[in-house]
Amino acid sequence: MLSHADAGPTDPDMSTPVQVKKVVKTVPPEKAVATVSKTKVEHTSPTTNMLTLLRNVPGFNVVSSGPANLVSTNSAFSLNGFGSSEIGTTFDGVPIINTVRGGVYGAGSDHALTPLTMGQIGSVEVYSGANTPRENSLDSLGGTVNFVPKQPSDKAGVDLMVGTGNYATTGYSSSYGVTGDTGAIAALDGLKAIASYTHTKTDSFQKNVFAKLNAYYLNVTQPFNQGLSKLAFILTHNDEKAQTPVTVPIALVEAYGRDFQYPRDAFWNRNQTHATHMIISLESYLNPYMAGGFKFFYNDSSNDRTEHVDPNINNSYMGYALPMHTQSAFALSGYGSNFNTYNAAEATALFGSPAAGTQYQRYVDHYYNVGGKGHLTFLLPSNTVTIGGMMFSAKNLTTTAWYGADPVPIIGGYNNAWLEHDGLDYAEGYIQDNISLLKGKVHIYPGVKYVHTQPSVTDIQGYYYAYSGSASKTYGFVEPSLGVTVSPVKTVELYANYGRTYKAPDESAFYSVIGYTPVPYPVVVKPEYVNSIDAGVRYSGAYGKASLSVFDRKFEDIFSEYYDNTTGITTEYNAGRADYKGFTIAAEKPLFHHLTLMGNYGYTDAKYTNNFTGANGTVSAGMPRPDVPTYTANLGLDYAEGAWFGEISGHFVGAQYIAYNTGATSTTQLPAYETVDLKGTYTWKLRSGVVKKIKVAAYIENLLDKKYYSYAYIQGTAGGSSNYELVQVGPPRFAGVTLTASF
């Protein structure tokens, strides 16, 4: 058994254990397959965001770029082939995804939303595939990523930071900020607090793409009960103004350069977003046989986006259609014929034509939830039992409207495409055990979780809905898990885990059942689920660290969505099965002269395992799943001695099959690519004066200025004669420097 003082920060519910002088028996948390340490977080470059921070985790493929998390697609990352809406993402163990829609951000065209910034993150844990009920979260089909909050320091002080840098093609990034620590205040029984503000401005390497981001953070912890209990309050708030990138035809990138984006006189978008997370937590050692904790949480995010399309170009720029989410340029002929909810005659009278009356499109997406989660651990001899659960209620309002001027009003029955209220009532309960045998050399972890979830959707009449209506459905499922660890010697651990995880259908499952008839059709989509097996060996000793793991994930009843350009309706259905198999190898070796060599390699083979025909096309057994890199790999060398820190690292992503815009796998592959990054810092510690230390850090990302594409898809269908490829370009070389003064 472990004491609280020994327990590491790998458990989302116990991320900062209280220091207890007496030994307290508690369940050892499941070890994350990969972590990003506090040191790594502190040495990130100015262009790092919450996801690019994880690029060096094997199996992790990141699409977003820049400190403001800008992305051109709804899936911002993948882990061993599972997309961002299929990975549980948490902050201090609390879900920070949009639980109604899925995905930490990006989904629903929220492409300029920043849930967390680097100044709010202390470290990160990645749990791959099967894990215990306490560690996993909503939508943990392929694993769970837990962001650990940045903690207050024991020493009081203030840090002032300023940084700037430039891309090799065009654009720059600059930032400044202040962070204050109270230190441990003896008069308040050791209360500690950290507060920070950071402003970041990015003029992207892509033309007409930019972001301004303000980030606020507060973390207050109050130990009591002689250090056996801790009360904490965490608040993050990030607001952003941006114009996001969009995928563009690869032919235009090749012709006009990798900084190409549509010119503003043809198309532009304006986004104003915010993301707020609040957590109040209590962790306590109750008596020699019990420990427990509870968290109350509130999440709120909003995106208000206006897009403008020149109506004279008739949805064609140099022969290519504009991005799919600019529906104002897609369905102009639909007004007056599709459900007759848009007044084409009035639009013509006001603006000269229905087209001119739709040149501005406004999209509003507002999500919030409130809930709580808790656990109670019974500390029994050679047996530790934990029971716990979580409940929350979530709401999501989305609406889109067209107009001929800016700002765009939202008028039901006149210019609204849809006005939708979504909801989710969620409850889960679990019990898990830690059976210790042979003096702790063998641990068995059985567990089971029951989930009860009820999504609901209410739509008013609009361009996409001939009739208003409401629909809901209740799902209940059981998620079993079983893990075993064996330590034949202190430095070696063998492990194997099995688990089943589910994802209930989200709001997309309701789009096609409302609007056709006065009474909505029943929802027939089933939850998708994964049976996961993970096994491996870990070594940690005098010679360094090493690990080898294998995984097999059988993905059943996979969701697929089909968008009908004629009706404007999205249909969701279950589309067959797939098998994800692979392995990961990682090593870390200290060398002479304060050097550390690190490397990892992750291989994933993801293929359909049955023949299936749906609205999006046909798949056959053995066909690859799209957007799954065959491998990811990293190689790095760190140097740390006294005031100096340096790192050179290579990041490699293998080839991947890309999809048609319908979602079906194409025969086209996105080529493999690699980038090299270089960073170095020097810290002066001053013996006297107001300034205690000064740190200068320099960064060069994509040192060799490698040209690559981080995401792509095919506009068209299998066998189509006018198909073409759209891409998101990876960032060119970036060189920057930051200066931090500590008082």
Image: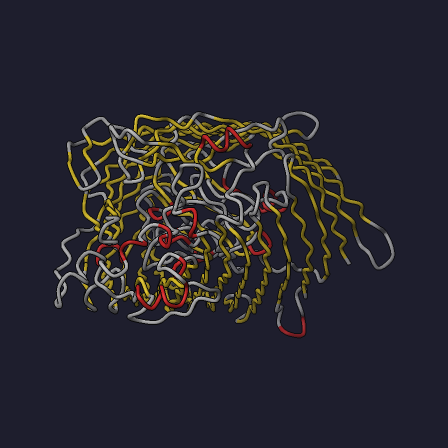
Residue shown at 22%/58% (left/top)? Answer: 337
Q: Is residue 550 above or below residue 698?
A: above
Give the left or right position of residue 153, taking residue 222 as reference: right
Image height check: is 178 above or below 582? Answer: below
Q: Residue at x 22, y 53 (%)?
A: 567
The quadrant holding residue 569 is bottom left
Residue 559 percent across, percent down from the top left: 23, 46
The x, y position of residue 458, in whole percent, is 25, 68
| Residue at 74%, 37% in the rendered image | 644
Q: Residue at x 67, y 60 (%)?
A: 179
The reply to whether residue 589 is visible in this rendering is no
Tell how many labels: 0
Position above or below: 103 against 699: below
Q: 268 or 43: nearer the eye?
A: 268
Does residue 432 appear to the left or right of 122 in the view shown? left
Residue 700 image point, x, y percent: 66, 35
Residue 43, quarter of the rendered image = top right
Image location of residue 473, percent across then percent down:
18, 62
Quarter in which the C terminus is drawn: bottom right
The front one of 293 and 35 is 35
- Nearest to the observer: residue 533 or residue 361: 361
Of residues 487 and 314, which is closer to you in this image?
314
